[in-house]
């Protein structure tokens, strides 16, 4: 009898130990899972003996970005020239994408920050002819944004140091462009923004009836560019918004809205629509990874001296009605 009791007790002890061990292992797995999920994807890179930087390695975190524009007579750029993300993915405009490995990306940062010394420049804006376009360079390092402007410079008397730094910035931009000469393929966006403005010179035969019931084109244009200003003298009352300058906001299209507009445009990203006797130019702008995550659109327009992101409207579009009838 004592032997049977001993065997039963031993079995219960084994089961109890097994349950305790399983619980402990499950707790460890959960802790590890939570720890991995809370990682902020940052890494530290030593630049030289006196300098190190941190940056995000997330595929949605912008690391380097360039724009071209800003001049008084410049044109509107609907997207950045180049965008480089923390995981090495790069996108040229919104058309082509590729990827560099982590070693190449860190070598690029070493060159920009050590050889070219961008973070040590005394001056960040190199422009002495204000009405011309320039190259705008954005770096996201150490949790903050650094901005540089490389334009027409040296037309006036400049110091030796300013000219030396100007050439270093130019070399840095060249290095970025040369680093991104690897293989690319078409960029496929997962979401699109609607950009629209009222126009007065459309060919009615080339316009399409507005298909969406969720919001009107009057609402869309007023939300993005504001109401048209009073103009009793000009036959063309259009504004510079979305022709030369960036809008106040843009509309993030829902999947069903995007599908409907794409069907009407036969796969094109631009076209002309009509509604209530008025005419509108619309553009379907592909979103970049950081834009979708932050609900902000990266664009650059004329007469602009610094980068300003364009907020994306999600959900219902504000109800306004101030459009001018077409004459």
Image (cartoon, grey):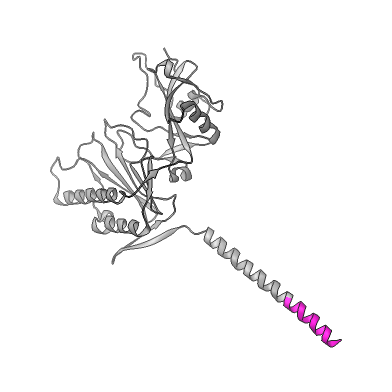
State yes or no: residue 249 in magenta.
no
| Whole-percent x, y for residue 238 in the image | 37, 21
Q: In the image, what residue occupies the spot 46% across and 28% down?
A: 266
Using residue 265 as the reference point, say whether residue 50 is left or right of it: left
Q: Going by the picture, which residue comes out furthest to the right?
A: 1
Give the position of the C terminus as an image quadrant. top left
The secondary structure making up most of the magenta span is: helix
Give the position of the N terminus as an image quadrant. bottom right
Using residue 106 as the reference point, say whether residue 129 is left or right of it: left
In the displayed structure, 100 sits above or below 252; it is below
| Whole-percent x, y for residue 41 in the image | 45, 58
| Whole-percent x, y for residue 280 in the image | 43, 22
Q: Is residue 315 visible?
A: no
Q: Nearer the viewer, residue 280 or 236?
A: 280
Q: Is residue 268 visible?
A: yes
Q: In the image, what residue occupies the spot 30% across and 33% down?
A: 302
Q: Going by the picture, which residue comes out furthest to the left?
A: 157
Range covered by the magenta-colored residues: 1-14
In the displayed structure, 111 sits above or below 158; it is below
Q: Nearer the viewer, residue 54 or 64?
A: 64
Q: Going by the picture, which residue comes out furthest to the top?
A: 327
Q: How many marks?
A: 0
Q: In the image, what residue occupies the spot 45% across and 15% down?
A: 325
Using residue 284 as the reference point, say whether residue 115 is left or right of it: left
State yes or no: residue 9 in magenta.
yes
| Whole-percent x, y for residue 236 in the image | 35, 17
């Amino acid at each position: 009898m004592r032997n049977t009791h001993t065997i039963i007790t031993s079995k219960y002890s084994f089961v109890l130990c097994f349950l305790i061990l399983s619980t402990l292992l499950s707790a460890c797995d959960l802790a590890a899972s939570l720890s991995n999920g809370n990682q902020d994807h940052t890494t530290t890179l030593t630049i030289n003996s006196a300098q190190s930087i941190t940056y995000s390695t997330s595929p949605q975190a912008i690391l380097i970005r360039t724009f071209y524009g800003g001049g008084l007579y410049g044109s509107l750029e609907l997207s950045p020239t180049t965008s480089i993300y923390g995981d090495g993915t790069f996108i040229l405009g919104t058309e082509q994408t590729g990827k560099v490995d982590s070693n190449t990306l860190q070598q690029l940062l070493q060159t920009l920050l050590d050889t070219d010394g961008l973070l040590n420049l005394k001056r960040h804006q190199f422009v002495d002819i204000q009405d011309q376009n320039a190259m705008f360079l954005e770096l996201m390092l150490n949790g903050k944004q650094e901005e540089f402007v490389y334009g027409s410079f040296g037309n006036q008397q400049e110091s030796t140091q300013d000219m030396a730094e100007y050439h270093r910035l130019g070399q840095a931009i060249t290095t970025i462009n040369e680093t991104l000469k690897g293989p690319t393929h078409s960029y496929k966006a997962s979401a699109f923004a609607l950009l629209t403005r009222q126009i007065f010179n459309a060919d009615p035969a080339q316009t399409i009836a507005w298909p969406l019931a969720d919001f009107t084109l009057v609402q869309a244009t007023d939300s993005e560019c504001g109401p048209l200003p009073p103009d009793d003298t000009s036959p063309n009352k259009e504004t510079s918004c979305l022709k030369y300058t960036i809008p106040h906001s843009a509309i993030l299209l829902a999947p069903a809205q995007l599908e409907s507009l794409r069907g009407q445009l036969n796969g094109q990203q631009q076209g002309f629509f009509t509604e209530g006797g008025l005419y509108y130019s619309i553009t379907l702008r592909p979103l970049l990874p950081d834009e979708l995550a932050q609900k902000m659109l990266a664009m650059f327009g004329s007469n602009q001296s610094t980068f300003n992101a364009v907020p994306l409207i999600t959900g219902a579009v504000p109800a306004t009605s101030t459009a001018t009838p077409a004459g």
